[in-house]
Image: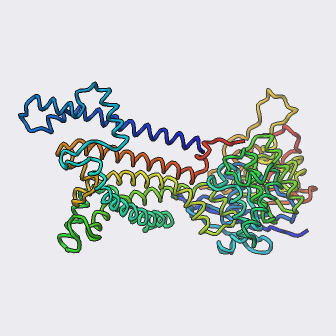
Amino acid sequence: MPNYLLTRIGESLLAIWGVVTIVFVVTRVLGDPAVLLLPIGSPAAALAELRSQLGLDQPILTQYVHFLGQAVRGDFGNSYQYMRPAMSVVLERMPATLMLAGSAIIIGIVLGGIAGLLAAIKRNTFVEYIVMFLALIGQATPMFWLGIVMIMFFAVNLGWLPTGGYGSFSNLVLPAMTLGTFVAASVTRLFRSSILDVLREEHVRTARAKGLRPKTIYVWHIGRNALIPVVTMVAILTAELLGGSAVAETVFSWPGVGRLIVQSIETQDFPVVQAAVCLVTTIFVFINLLVDIGYSLLDPRIRSHGGGHE
Amino acid sequence: MSTLLDISDLTVRFETRRGFVHAVNGVSYTLEKGKTLGIVGESGSGKSVHFLAALGLLPPTVKREITGRVLFDGKDLLTLSDEELSDIRGRDIGVVFQDPMSALNPVLTVGRQLREVLMRHQPLSKAQAEARAIELLDLVGIPEPQRRVRQYPHQFSGGMRQRVMIAIAISCQPKLLIADEATTALDVTVQAQIVDLIRDLSAKMDMSVIWITHDLGVLAGIADQVQVMYGGRVMERGPVDAIFDNPRNAYTRGLLNSVPSLDENAEKRLYQIPGSPPDLSKPPVGDPFAPRNPDATERCFAEMPPLRAVEGSPGHVVAAWYELPPYAEGSR
């Protein structure tokens, strides 16, 4: 177990280092920040001074080591647009993203869990067909379209909810429903098929041969085994949503990290893009690490990596 | 001697897209308390399906029609609700399945899988059930049961896993143990250990056993009676010696001839029954084995033979219109 954990942590650090390196290379390829920062037509001397200020006149390896050192501390320089440390600009947007992602995941798990279980229990009936049809539509509908339709229906036609913005609960409902629909549809489909797979497994027949009650069988023998793939998928979706859902956040003018990244790319605010990409990557990798640990709690076969066999 | 199990005219049909599959066609037999009945037959003979149907263990997704009567301890299992049946399963009837790799839940400890059956049927606390689980593991010959009880199935070898399955099956001291191909997935040496274990346990606990297998050889040492099934029907039944020394059904004879023998020339090809099992979605009107039987008569194709007593062989019944020549090993 400790070995497994150490290996996974090592792999995670490697992944983050890889992304940070890619970010460094890409920003150096993209062009000269000094040209961007100074007004067009500035004298060459001013450009050279700024370059030496930013350390851009040093050998590329020195710059890279310097960049790594700053990245570890979360220092990506000042935002060109906000004139404040880029990382703090990104972090300010995190609560909004967290709130939206959290709501969407909760909606998705509750709705998807119930729908998936229902479809599996009522298999080969009308109920299953309807649930699965809705789930298919929910998963296949593009999010920007669903978001716009939601705005049209609930905000414009019915006038129940605001079209966008941030601050109160009523602002949260539409974006959370939009994202939650997608999560719920994915959870429904995977949970149902996972339950049906486990139902066919022989150990479920053993459980019935032991005379166990249907509830015990569903919770401990089917549910627990069927959850393993669902946990993975939900965690990966969570990680993606924590990186900000650029589409939903843009459609609903939700001030989250996803929208910030899109805006910063448009305005060529590279420190913010770098900070956001590195932060989002770290969150993603960290959640994946948590998934693997959680996985090993659910499935003892992973814990020992097939070892301990006699 | 009292009767524990009395099955009469048990029929199981599955409804599939391509029509009905006649898996079990009028099976009747009885089992006395403390006795061991060996049921032998190839895949599709109905040997497993008939007991799964009786215990309500067929896959819930399959549409089926079950008729007949299965008296267990005086109660007709086919008339019980699933709730009532589940009280009997695991308590009065234990089942050991073929593949211990997949028959145990991979994500629960062995101890937990033992405890849950104990606590379902007996008023035990968790600690008492744990202690009993350790006793049971010890009883089935698993070394270091205190340590093993906390382990998961993947940490056991195939033979040890099957011992765990047996421990689960006998945990509530059932009146009947059904071993469904319990040794098929195991190494030959381990097979012998499992056979011995179940024989010893059944003697110790005065437990009836139904031993289902496709391997006649396994039954020689353990069964009191042997029943041969084919195409969802009972073809022959009798005391173990009568079946081995004097088979009266051509299918039984074919099975006996396909058992490899140590004193035979190793160069000789093992006997194989020609043809393939019947298509149970189109059940034959006559004897299902007739198309593969060189001794079949015209009547065999036209009419299913009923079970009749074999003259001079008490307790021995056979379904055959024909009379086979006296059996000598190697004859066909």
For this orientation, the residue located farthest to the left is A41
Does residue B181 appear to the left or right of A286 in the view shown?
Answer: right
Residue for point 26% across, 67% down: A167
How many numbered marks, from 0 up? Answer: 0
**Quarter-wise, where is residue B311 in the image?**
bottom right
Does residue A273 appear to the left or right of B170 in the view shown?
Answer: left
Measured as percent of width and height from the top left, residue B303 is found at 71, 58
For this orientation, the residue located farthest to the top is A59
Question: Relative to A32, is A245 above or below?
Answer: below
Say if residue B306 shows up in the picture.
no
**Quarter-wise, where is residue B23 in the image?**
bottom right
Could you say which is closer to the camera, residue A161 or residue B56? A161
For this orientation, the residue located farthest to the right is B312
Measured as percent of width and height from the top left, residue A290 is found at 48, 50
Does residue A291 appear to the left or right of A276 in the view shown?
Answer: right
Could you say which is closer to the camera, residue B113 or residue A258? A258
Question: Relative to B326, is A195 above or below?
Answer: below
**Quarter-wise, where is residue A150 in the image?**
bottom left
Question: Relative to B51, is A89 above or below?
Answer: above
Query: Looking at the figure, which quarter contains the N terminus of chain B?
Result: bottom right
Measured as percent of width and height from the top left, residue B279 is found at 62, 51
Say if residue A175 shows up in the picture.
yes
Residue for point 65% across, 72% down: B82
Q: How is the image coloured?
A: rainbow
Residue for point 29% across, 42% down: A76
Query: Looking at the figure, which quarter contains the C terminus of chain B?
Result: top right
Residue for point 82% across, 66% down: B175
Measured as percent of width and height from the top left, residue B86 is found at 68, 70
